[in-house]
Amino acid sequence: MIKLQLSGVSKSYGGLEVLSPTDMEVKEGEFVTLLGPSGSGKTTLLKMIAGITDVTQGRILIGGSDVTHVPARHRDLAMVFQNYALVGHMSVFENVAFPLKVRRLPSAEIRRKVTAALATVRLEQFAGRKPAELSGGQQQRVAIARALVYDPSLVLMDEPLGALDKRLRDQLQEEISQLHRKLGITVVYVTHDQQEAMSLSDRIVLMNHGRIEQVAAPEELYRRPDTEFAAEFLGDSNFLSGKAAGTGQSQSICLSSGEDVRAPQECVLSSGAAVKVMVRPEKIVLRPLGTCASEDLNIVPATVVERVFLGGMTRLILELADGTPVRAVSSDDMTVAEIASGTRINMGWHPKDAIIFKSAS
Ligand SMILES: Nc1ncnc2c1ncn2[C@@H]1O[C@H](COP(=O)(O)OP(=O)(O)OP(=O)(O)O)[C@@H](O)[C@H]1O
Ligand SMILES: [Mg+2]
């Protein structure tokens, strides 16, 4: 069942469009993340779903009802912000109870629900404290409890972990993930942190310059980015420039560094077209000099320019004949001497592991 549906939703400020007409669907119980660089329109989109900001055009449906012009407090949703937005002079209990008091619930029910919500975020023993007497992570857990306490059918979170340090962020990510699974709530989450988006989401809505670049499950987005932006924003990527050559079944690409390499099988390119070959660092294989290319392995000579030992793996920066840098991760079967800085080496990849983008230039 579709929980949230946006049709042609756009936003302009003073005639300047900051969000292009956007279509989006979120299924009941789904965890969807709006991911994108600063200024890409994530908060704008979330605030329109919340009803805090008016839409310029388009329609928003929640649970099948058109809420485009319904005020925020009647949309049956909760929002969690980056800065917690707790009321300083109220205790933790009173903060969490607030949305229930506004809804005029009987006090016994308020007590029961607040206690349960605080238990969910493991803060029962802090009920009497003021927000200022809590750590950042604890304050954000109070804000999450306050959002969940009235069983909203949709929870919106805008960078809820943005103000926390790395360790706390990891811990709360895990808690949010567990809460989502346990309560079966529908979540629309905003972050510019790709790792956070990948670990939490059922699907990621990748945004760029006020429009949706791609919508996909994290793995799909990583493995099959539609655009150079998507490939670059999510994970590490190498881009090798070249020109398409050959036709039909035997598509090949002549790299700017001089070598001919095979294109992936399904790739159809017009001969002479400028392209970029994208290969993830972990898909780069290293071979001793003298290794020949084969049907399923492209080989390009390179020089090791930097080598960083990281314990479980060694990260390498290689350079091709035309100076193109290539990031790689060492394979276990190469000895330290074979990958020392300054060493000439063969690097390569399986044609199926590359993605070809037509470049503008
Ligand atoms: N009230 C406003 N008036 C005019 N322009 C605005 C207003 N609010 C946002 N914008 C513009 O809309 C664009 C998108 O802003 P938005 O806050 O949605 O970005 P974001 O993706 O959430 O970025 P961040 O990661 O920095 O939070 C930006 O260019 C911003 O300057
Ligand atoms: Mg924002």
Image: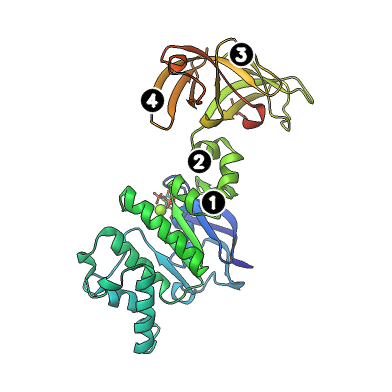
What residue sits right under mark 2 in the picture?
A: 234
Tell me, yes or no, whether the two marked residues, 2 and 1, touch with CB atoms within 8 Å: yes
- Image location (x, y in percent) of residue 59: 58, 65
- Report if the CB atoms under discs 1 and 4 are less than 8 Å apart: no
Q: Amino acid at mark 2?
A: Leu
Alpha carbons under labels 1 and 4: distance apart: 32 Å
Measure how far apart labels 4 and 3 are at the Cα level: 24 Å
* SS assignment at label 4: strand
Q: Residues within 10 Å of mark 3 (few under 14, many from 20)?
A: some
Q: Which residue is mark 3?
A: 291
Local crowd size for mark 2, using a 10 Å CA cut-off: few (<14), some (14–19), many (≥20)? many
* Ligand 1 under 8 Å from disc 2 Cβ: no
Q: Nearer the viewer, mark 1 or mark 4?
A: 4
Q: Nearer the viewer, mark 2 or mark 4?
A: 4
* Mark 3 / mark 1, whichever is N-terminal: 1
- Residue appearing at x 66%, y 27% in the figure: 351
Residue type for callout 1: Ile
Residue at the spot 44% in from the left edge and 30% down from the top edge: 313
Which badge, 2 or 1, comes first in the chain's sequence? 1
Q: Quadrant of residue 147?
A: bottom left
Residue denoted by label 4: 308
